[in-house]
Image (cartoon, rainbow, N blue to C red):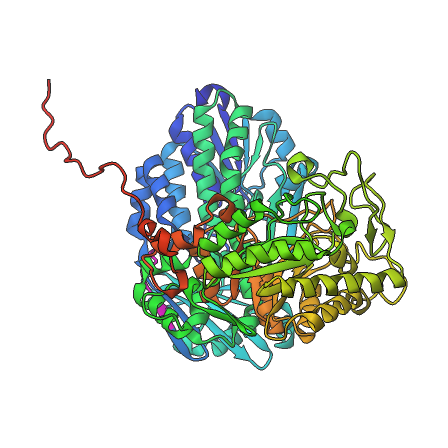
Amino acid sequence: MAGEVAVKVAVIGGGPGGLYAAALLKRLDPAREVTLWERNAPDDTFGFGVVLSDETLGGIEHADPVVHAALQRAFVRWDDIDIVHRGVRHTSGGHGFAALGRRRLLRILHERCRSLGVELRFRTEAPDAVRLARTHDLVVAADGVHSTTREAFADVFRPRVTGHRCRYAWLAADFAFDAFRFEIAETEHGVMQLHGYPYAADSSTVIVEMREEVWRAAGFDETDGTESIERCAKVFADALGGRPLRSHRSTWTTFRTVVNARWSHGNVVLLGDAAHTAHFSIGSGTKLAVEDALALAACLDEQPSVREALAAYEGERRPVVESTQRAARASLEWFEDLDLYLGQPSRRFAFNLLTRSRRVTHGNLRLRDARFTEAVEREFGCPPGTPPMFTPFRLRGLTLRNRVVVSPMDMYSAVDGVPGDFHLVHLGARALGGAGLVMTEMVCVSPEGRITPGCAGLWTGRQAEAWRRITDFVHRQAPGTAIGVQLGHSGRKGSTKPMWEGTDEPLDDGNWPLVAASPLPYKPGGQLPRELSRAQLTDMREQFAAAAARAARAGFDLLELHCAHGYLLSGFLSPLTNRRTDAYGGSPEKRLRFPLEVFDAVRAVWPEERPMTVRVSATDWADGGTTAEDAVGIARAFAAHGADAIDVSTGQVVADEEPEFGRSYQVPFADRIRHRVGVPVIAVGAISSWDDVNSLILAGRADLCALARPHLYDPHWTLHAAAEQGYAGPGADWPAPYRAGSRPPRTGRTDAPKPRLVLGS
């Protein structure tokens, strides 16, 4: 089938991805005419060593045992990762690496291509991609990060290339490290780091990386290649054992992340770095290119036409690549912000580094190296047998028995702002479920401050009495669980339908007037709010204070001020929603003024021993809006006014936001605030597993983790997390009536004897 749809194939680029694609396509159909163009000589290459995963090798083994066998003979293997931090080396084992020289890999692929009949044209520029597309059935563009093919069809592929903040040089040393080594050097100019690993019995790849400003301060921008290499060898003399470094036309460069809206156009398809890049700190470039080649060849073999095959290829690979790019971005940014973590205890620093991409977690690190992980836990202060998530945490006069928070979730089920039986069951069930802190939905300070007609409030004594019924239940029936209230005002996002009838959609009738920092509707054509006058600001501040006093009488243990998600106080903080020209608009300090006034008014009536937190949107995910650096300033201001913790969320401030969704995608914002401001943080955002919670807490990226949807799926999420980890300590105490369910129920038998003998017919 494949031969009928792609008889004549052109491959542009002679890196591993292009070569392997050529070999596979020829192997699957020997009648194919496959030609590969590479403008450089056969041995010209960037970098020295290549690391491949067992997963990638498994795919190669099934697709081409000849290549797999040649790779196996060339590999060096090791299991350990060494992290050297302030002169202390910690080793984590069980990781399983396989590497070989990049030139050796290319030679293996050259030999395989030639043996199969692929025509290799080195030192030859490929013809124009438009011309190749007319004369060939398929054009595979594997021409790298600077792909001319991608640029030729830029209007279709719509590439986005993002530069980053570090400079790096790809070097080598003539000895073999005995582990993957990360070494941190704190120099007079700033922090530099070394990434090193063996790729042959007598050779190692060495990548030296540092922030752009450090690179310039150290004078590397004014040195030639030889001097740069010699200076790097001196900085990392201990790691290198005093040995020199060498290069192969290596230059200082910045990493660029390549993303394309599409990967194919007609019969032209992008592969490897031409389609996508992922930072070298997770060792993924060659891996992704080889896996692309495997998928492309398979799809061409399976689909009835080239067009359908290329669509299937992108459909298969894009989710995998996007996941890898998210992990690579997290790793890249961790190294960019390396100075944030230097003050951590050395073992915790090492754990933080190992889990930086979020692909290695507390759980799988325990499987790889239980001794190392247990040492980190002891340094953190975990009692024996206690997962990090079940360690206590103190906020002012409140000690939480574990690090799990039931995140505020709007239920839209109140009547006239009064919480009823639904709220009692909803919050009571989650309190019985073992979380350290259960938060209410956003509780509104006035009728006009509601999001929907079903929002709960605290503007009357009757509402406070109804809340008292719920807090009494939690304190009586779920001792050890704290309950917090989140106070807020909808601002310009009010007078809407419940989300299951249309998120942020205005009511069909019965609307109430809206107020905001500035007269800007949330959505085009939406209800226009009035700009709050100075007198109304005073009234609003008093409404928040009065609601806080009622919350105190209602028995809440903690109060959170909602300054996120585009609601009233958030609207003052963002430059996209605050266009005021008075003392409450303009500079960041002026935009902070009213939220801080409200915070101070609430703190003044909230009992001294009870903690108060603030939820912020740490980015608007929109041009011109609040940035991660702005959020640090906002958090610092609230901390200076007495906030006990910052609950770090993102977005929902403007309707045209473009969030970068992914697992734990908001955690880096909390991490930055925690380390820059020195204030405890609550992390939120697609944290879905107890393994994630353990990882984030132990790495020091968060103090508490708030989960929403997992608690809707399973009200006893925390207790089940304890049971699944074999933990039965004070951090997750099962209510007496539920203790019989503290072990998973038995299922059907799975240990039936297996057949030992099969007789032929």
Picture quarter with the N terminus: top left
Looking at the image, residue 703 sits to the left or right of residue 529; the answer is left
Image height check: is 497 above or below 137?
Answer: below
Percent of width and height locating residue 651: 67, 52
Image height check: is 586 above or below 690?
Answer: below
Percent of width and height locating residue 302: 44, 24
Percent of width and height locating residue 142: 53, 41
The answer to which image quadrant residue 216 occupies is: bottom right
Q: Residue furthest bottom?
A: 188
Asked if the stretch drawn in magenta spans residue 231, the answer is no
Q: Report if residue 557 is visible in the image.
A: yes
Percent of width and height locating residue 9: 51, 29
Q: Which residues are magenta?
A: 90-96
Q: Residue at x 40, y 54 (%)?
A: 719
Image height check: is 18 above or below 380?
Answer: above
Asked if the stretch drawn in magenta spans residue 95, the answer is yes
Q: Residue at x 37, y 33 (%)?
A: 116
- Number of labels in the image equals 0
Picture quarter with the C terminus: top left
Q: Residue at x 39, y 56 (%)?
A: 735
Q: Nearer the viewer, residue 467 or 236?
A: 467
Image height check: is 666 above or below 392?
Answer: above
Q: Nearer the viewer, residue 618 or 409?
A: 409
